Image (cartoon, rainbow, N blue to C red):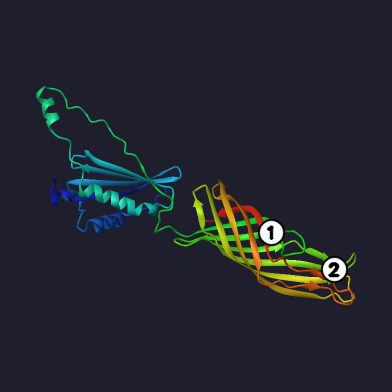
Amino acid sequence: MLTEAALLVSLSVTHGQGTADCATHAQLSSAVERRLKRRVFVPAEQAALRVDVTFSKRGEDIEAKILLADEQGRSRGTRSLLTSSHCSALDDSLALSVALLVDEPPEPPPAAAASDAEKNGAAAPAAPPRTPTPLTIPPEVVAPREPWHALIGAAVGAAWGPLPQVSPALALQLQLLLHGFAPILLQAEGFWPSDAARDASSGAHFRLLRAGLALCPRLLSTPQNSLGFCAGQKLGWLEVEGYGFDVDASDTRLGFSFSLGAEARQVLWKPLALRAYLGGEIPLIRDRFTSAGNNAVELFQPSPVTLAGEIGVEVALW
């Protein structure tokens, strides 16, 4: 067994292009020593072993390659970790892998074979190089230093129920992806004007604007696509204006509804993605609109359950 003094090692950390957010020398050494509850890393001139950690990009993934070597530069163990998420998702696994390597490093190959070869005047056989299998960190592993992300998008849609007819709409959206919290969706919608007729010459024009706030947890998420649901609320401004009457009145009413639906997202090419949504709403306020006078009739009342769908594009701001 190696003595406590021989277990002291030097550490070097190298960041390749695009990996500046990965763990620093200070962060990694501190995490390893907290795990082992002792001093581990010393200057190179005091160390019997050396650990080199190199971060690099591999396509959409980030790799952390660990090499443990002795004073003569001979490899004593290697590890390779991969993540498709933010680089800090590697933090815990990387600290554990380094701690395991430096706490009980692999024993050097026995010298007996080399001695026998030397006696016979032949060179000792070289051990075949072994490429370690990269360990892939699941994308759902927490990345503690991952920054917030924001997606901005535009969509066309249609709704049945909040207006007299199925009405097309234009929506603008901002989705905030917060670390450790469900994505937050902020939305503004404007609907094409819709009419409700009393007869061939009179009725009412309806115009609807809405603002929405929802939480959108993702049930399935990869770098290329995601699937989840959105639960939230919408506040609407419904403007009504009569036409064809002796006195054409107008009014503006506030509406409020709860919404629940499913959303899907597919990356077309970064940073552009396609987003689709289908859901339902339950309005808490259902005003009735009727004409006045002897021939009063009900022109419109919102449906107790409404349906809405959208399809559009999103751009990742960062």
Spot occupied by residue 170 in the image (x, y as percentages of width and height): 69, 59
The mark found on residue 203 in the picture is: 2
Q: Which residue was labeled with disc 1? A: 170
Local secondary structure at mark 1: strand
Mark toward the viewer: 1 or 2: 2
Spot occupied by residue 248 in the image (x, y as percentages of width and height): 85, 74
The image shows a total of numbered marks equal to: 2
Q: In this view, does 199 lie above or below 19?
A: below
The reply, left or right, for residue 293 in relation to residue 185 is right
Q: Which of marks 1 and 2 is nearer the N terminus?
A: 1
Q: Classify 10 Å Cα crowding around label 2: few (below 14), some (14-19), many (20 and above).
A: many
- From where the camera sits, is residue 180 visible? yes
Between 8 and 256, the one lying in front of the other is 256
The reply, left or right, for residue 119 in relation to residue 285 is left
Q: Which residue is drawn at 88% across and 68% down?
A: 202
Between 12 and 196, the one lying in front of the other is 196
Q: Which residue is drawn at 14% across and 29% down?
A: 113
Spot occupied by residue 255 in the image (x, y as percentages of width and height): 68, 71
Local secondary structure at mark 2: strand
Three-letter code, disc 1: Leu
The mark found on residue 219 in the picture is: none
Residue farthest to the left, as pictured: 119
Spot occupied by residue 105 in the image (x, y as percentages of width and height): 21, 45
Q: Which residue is drawn at 55% across and 60% down?
A: 175
Dividing the picture into quadrants, the one containing residue 82 is top left
Three-letter code, disc 2: Gly
Mark 1 and mark 2: Cα distance apart in space: 25 Å
User: Where does the N terminus fall, quadrant-wise?
Assistant: top left
